[in-house]
Image (tube, grey):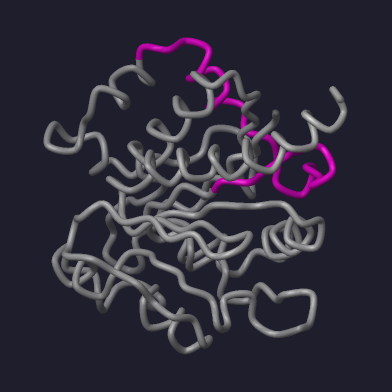
Amino acid sequence: MKVLMVLTSHDQLGNTGRKTGFWLEELAAPYYVFKDAGVEITLASPKGGRPPLDPKSNEPEFRTDLTLRFEKDAAAEAQLDKTLRLDSVRQEDFDTLFYPGGHGPMWDLAEDEHSIKLIESFIRAGKTIALVCHAPGALRHVKAPDGKPLVQGKEVTGFTNGEEEAVGLTHVVPFLVEDEMMKLGAVFSKVADWGVHVVSDGQLITGQNPHSSGPAAKVLMAALNEKTGPSITARAS
């Protein structure tokens, strides 16, 4: 099984002068869900190469056993150094797609034509995908095969207005994930700020915040195993 993980290349937090990027837990937690299940992982980003890490995500209060494991994992760090350019990857080469968040995707992946087309191609191919925290913002221009917004009528979650308010960035981000999803006609589902929450609706799996990234990857793996299970059995018989 092969998974493509797409990270942001954007490192500026609006006009604050502060840095942003991807959130470490949202890469590390899913990464090891996949790696420990024997899944082949490919990392990509719009610009390729080493994507920017949100420095805040590596402060002591946000470190986890899995972020520490990632930092000590020479093979994982080597992969992160050499992410593929997003315009060079093809849906046909992967079984699924996972988007970690961080604030960066709000600026680049949300507007990136290669990202939009890539997600649309996975959906057209009938493949299940997952996005967590701010990454559901990358769905804002994505269309379903019928031309309607992909999230229209679907239950989704993502970083909430309350969580954005709590980190003081409501007026810095280009849009609010919760508001944008609702504007597009999604049914936005959430729990208390920082609670673990994963929503699965058809081919789309979304997680609310960093703590939901590992659980979202587990839900994705379960969906993929369910999908491949019957076909493997059928071939065997």
Magenta-tinted stretch: 72-98
Q: Is residue 81 magenta?
A: yes
Horizontal arrangement in the rendering, residue 29 relative to residue 151 (left or right): left
Q: Position of residue 79 (x, y in %)?
A: 57, 22
In the image, residue 50 sits, relative to residue 215, either above or below, namely above
Q: Is residue 82 magenta?
A: yes
Between 24 and 95, the one lying in front of the other is 95
Q: Which residue is drawn at the image coordinates 42% and 12% (left, top)?
A: 73
Which quadrant would the C terminus be assigned to in this image? top right
Q: Which residue is drawn at the image coordinates 40% and 31% (left, top)?
A: 28
Q: Position of residue 18 (x, y in %)?
A: 27, 55
Q: Which residue is drawn at the image coordinates 50% and 55% (left, top)?
A: 131
Q: Seen from this angle, which residue lies furthest front?
A: 237
In the image, residue 50 sits, relative to residue 171, either above or below, namely above
Number of labels in the image equals 0
Which quadrant would the N terminus be assigned to in this image? top right
* Image quadrant assignment for residue 116: bottom right
Q: Position of residue 208 (x, y in %)?
A: 34, 59
